[in-house]
Image (cartoon, rainbow, N blue to C red):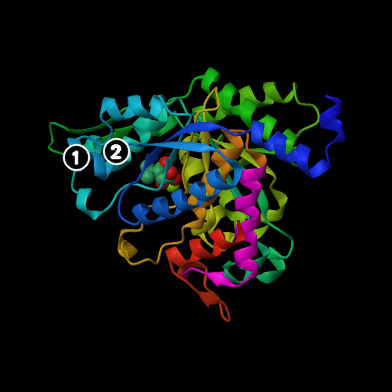
Amino acid sequence: MELELDKPAGLSRLSCRKDMRMKKKIGVIRGDCSSREIVEQTLRVLDALAKKYGHEWEYEPIAMGGDAIDQYGSPLPDHELEKALNCDAVLLGAVGGPKWEGLPGAQRPEKGLLALRKGMGLFSNLRPAKIWPQLADASPLKKEITDRGIDFVIVRELTGGVYFGDHTTTVGEDGVKQALDLMPYDENEIRRIGKVGFETAMKRGKKLTLVDKANVLDTSRLWREVLYDLAKEYPEVDFDVMFVDNCAMQICKNPAQFDTIVTENMFGDILSDEASEITGSIGMIPSSSLGEGTRGLYEPIHGSAPDIAGKNLVNPLACILSAAMMLRYSFGMEQEAADIENGVEAVLNDGFRTADMMSEGMNLVGTREMTDALLAKL
Ligand code: IPM
Ligand code: MG
């Protein structure tokens, strides 16, 4: 013990880091179309961090989406879900593409993603919307709005609502087709995500907004009832409610007012795309999906961008930043996560831009070159 204390500070820090070497099993879903490229680049970054910190990653390839349809005829076969359940965390790019578009709903690549979220019990999806000041020029919003800052997070319920209610299409006796999508929520599902909302707000600016459509939907009225009740347990949190249509407008008009938003599955899907766009590029927004434990799924919020697949054009940073969230939330590796985030900041400061976030005077680079620049910062 005394010997430890006698060591120069640098050395004892080093020995401490050595003890923190970890071995983790990471499920890797290559995904479809340009997802392949971003996942490949993200693994380069993870490899570099493993080397730097002495960690060991065991990559478990998992087929999901179009890739799984091609290999097994199903977007998420049981054996692939089983693999995901045996990992410490799962990293994903994105799924879907024109090749599988004609398939019936239940066999589409997206169904694999929904089954994976459900099968892993990932009811809580965090989507940060934070403007990188370096990208403010790429935001479609006026400078006077971006100058006030954008830094909020959407806590999206991920395993309930209309995504998982019954979907049916029938033909009536008169030959008229009718389709029905049900949006069920029970109070327990609402309470557990509501808690995540309040806890997230507590760690941030202590302001929580429930976004709903309580002027029309029963589900929304139940959300309000449950969240007003929960709010009593979090007296420090400034809690308010907002209709989703108004929220869509407020996100462009005055995004600085938001700190933490909690909302049901489909509203969260829609608002998070809008929120990402105002920060400069959807190609920069990572996400984490968690359930009760630490095993999460990490994916960029953007799609598989089939139009630019295989051209070294896609922005790898949202996927790489998703890996940072994985290191932090599933593995507790704060320093390693910060390395990625600081590295991203540094490459943006150096002027590197992929096409999606290009603005005048910047240095346009491809997927690989962006990652090279980031690796040089690690
Ligand atoms: C997302 C995507 C998915 C969703 C699609 C691909 C099913 O848009 O993660 O936001 O709607 O959840
Ligand atoms: Mg979406």
Neighbour class for label 1 at 10 Å: few (<14), some, many (≥20)?
few
Q: Position of residue 291 (x, y in %)?
A: 52, 26
Name the side, left or right, on which 115 lies relative to 155.
Answer: left
Residue linked to disc 1: 71
| Front residue of 285 and 266 | 285
Q: Position of residue 212 (x, y in %)?
A: 56, 37
Q: Residue at x 39, y 40 (%)?
A: 28
Image mark for residue 160 = none
| Front residue of 89 and 143 | 89
Considering every residue shown, the one lying at the far bottom of the view is 361
Name the side, left or right, on which 37 lies relative to 7.
Answer: left
Image quarter for residue 5?
Answer: top right
Q: Are marks 2 and 1 in contact (CB under 8 Å)?
A: yes
Image quarter for residue 254?
Answer: bottom right
Residue linked to disc 2: 63
Q: Residue at x 68, y 25 (%)?
A: 228
